[in-house]
Image: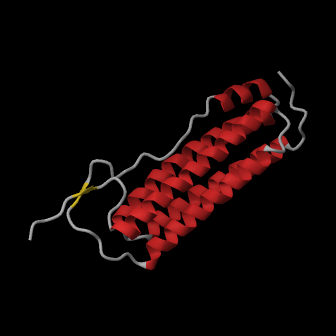
Amino acid sequence: MPKNDDPQLLKYLNEAVKLEKSSMKFYTTARNKTSNFNMKTLLNAFLTVEIEHLLTVSKVRDLVKKKQTTKAVAQAKKFKSTVPVNPFKDMVQLEKFSMYGSDIFTLFKGATELEQKAENFYRDDAGSVKHPEIKKFFTRFAADEKRHQKFLLKHKVAVYNDGYWLGIDHVRLQS
């Protein structure tokens, strides 16, 4: 097992912790500000994922800080993909929504940009890390962030193009 011969590793892990805290703050603030129940629900799903991300990178960082690289690698290997569970699965929407306000669009845009920033960070910094297992850890995080972007974009398209939140059954009322 290679030793921690990368003096930048702790710096990258500290940055990852800051990034995940920033993401949590965004999702918490956005959830608390929006009045749209469905957007609150979606933001809560993302907040749950960001909490998992923060706990994971914090544990790895703390172990590296204590020079327990072998344990840090073991913790990094435990990381599993954390795509949000669709909170609208098996729900029913009776009528198509006709229009959403700009606040919903702004939240989708902000969340997508946040996930893109996180993907870039993990992908770019993963290329700089010398430790092969931590490099894989960052690469898996980058892929996770990319899946989050796709998940958000699918919801945005569903809401703006179809008038239904992704995963909600479409039930049309008879006239």
Residue 4: horizontal and vertical position, in percent? 86, 31
Residue nearest the viewer, comparing 92 with 21? 92
Residue 48 drawn above or below residue 61: below
Residue 134: tell me if it is visible: yes
Looking at the image, which residue is at 67% across and 36% down? 59
* In this rendering, position of residue 4 left or right of residue 81: right
Residue 107 drawn above or below residue 137: below
Looking at the image, which residue is at 40% across and 70% down? 160
* In this rendering, position of residue 42 left or right of residue 170: right
Looking at the image, which residue is at 57% across and 34% down? 80
Residue 62: tell me if it is visible: no
* In this rendering, position of residue 27 left or right of residue 1: left
Residue nearest the viewer, comparing 56 with 99? 99
Residue 158: horizontal and vertical position, in percent? 39, 62
Circle count: 0
Pick out the residue farthest to the left: 175
Residue 78: horizontal and vertical position, in percent? 62, 29
Residue nearest the viewer, comparing 8 with 151? 151
Residue nearest the viewer, comparing 163 with 128? 163
* In this rendering, position of residue 86 left or right of residue 109: left
Looking at the image, which residue is at 34% across and 66% down? 162
Name the image colouring.
Answer: secondary structure
Residue 108: horizontal and vertical position, in percent? 50, 66
Quadrant containing the N terminus in the rendered view: top right
Quadrant containing the C terminus in the rendered view: bottom left
